[in-house]
Image: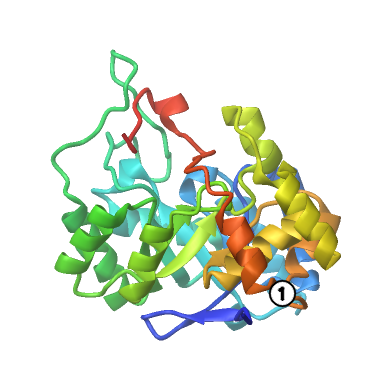
Amino acid sequence: MAAATALALSSGHQMPAVGLGVWRMDSPAIRGLIHSALRAGYRHFDCAADYQNEAEVGEALAEAFQTGLVKREDLFITTKLWNSDHGHVVEACKDSLKKLRLDYLDLYLIHFPVATKHTGVGTTASALGDDGVLDIDTTITLETTWHAMEDLVSMGLVRSIGISNYDIFLTRDCLAYAKIKPAVNQIETHPYFQRDSLVKFCQKHGISVTAHTPLGGSTANTEWFGSVSCLDDPVIKSLAEKYGKTPAQLVLRWGLQRNTVVIPKTSKVERLEENFAVFNFEISSEDMERIKALDRNYRTNQPAKFWGIDLYA
């Protein structure tokens, strides 16, 4: 099963199948990592207002354009609307564009399907109530937010729009009220959290799936959430050995062969290159089934730790 190097979106644009996520990337290291990633062949970068490093990413990109390392039109840049800015979509998008030093975004996503108390455009606070629970704004519907996202396309600020962390019900609703249907749903999915029904539903309806946390969180989520990574699974390790690849390469290739986009995050240059070297081998259908059998329905990225409420409940 050959894996595409890019996926065609419903918006008519192409999205590179492997990207670099910049979540929890330390600001001082960003310039070097992005330039190393560009030299390694990456053309897709996944950002978010909530990561609080858009300005540093913007500086690195501006320098890359200025020095001729890459052209803007060769890149695919994603960023995301934070929960507290659902009532301020245009201003939030413009704030991200200013920080990223870009004239347009290739993809703008609703980060989570929940509006929270507004704390000022671009501040991305998660305001908690006196009870320690996320202060959810019940006056803004996801439909209202989506129509504001559609306005960004007509304004020329964004080429494609999408959703993130939406389940089947919310995705179905979005399809019902959308004038421009979501091009992408970005969700956590990896061998321990495969979400086949959601992936198949999205793909059946022309919504491309981006796998965030495609390696099961590895070190970062173990540290933050105490979760276990699929990279340590004996089946993954033995299959990686069989194909002469690392466990991470095997898991990323599995994601590509499911026709999903993968956006692994790393702060190590050697891992950048390793994570990108996933187009020169193919996992057999038999081994794809062996990986399918590893599903634990195990979410490793759980913001309830910070919000005092499980939005996935």
Image quadrant where residue 66 sits: bottom right
Image quadrant where residue 254 sits: bottom right
In the rendered image, which quarter contains the C terminus?
top left
Depth check, front residue: 272 or 137: 272
Residue 77 on image: x %, y %: 54, 68
Residue type at tag 1: Gln
As drawn, 4 above or below 17: below
Residue at the limit of the structure toward the top, as seen here: 130
Secondary-structure class at tag 1: helix
- Residue at image point 75% right, 74% down: 41
Residue 284 on image: x %, y %: 68, 73
Residue 196 on image: x %, y %: 43, 59
Depth check, front residue: 61 or 250: 250
Query: Is residue 18 among what the camera can see?
Result: no
- Residue at image point 72% right, 52% down: 236
Residue 119 on image: x %, y %: 33, 35
Residue at the limit of the structure toward the bottom, as seen here: 12
- In this rendering, position of residue 236 left or right of residue 148: right
Give the class, few, some or many, for how many residues have Cα within 10 Å of label 1's Cα (few <14, many ≥20).
Answer: few
Task: Please state the total of marks drawn on the protein image.
Answer: 1
Tell me the residue that label 1 is attached to. Answer: 66
- In this rendering, position of residue 86 left or right of residue 302: left
As drawn, 74 above or below 49: below
As drawn, 233 above or below 282: above
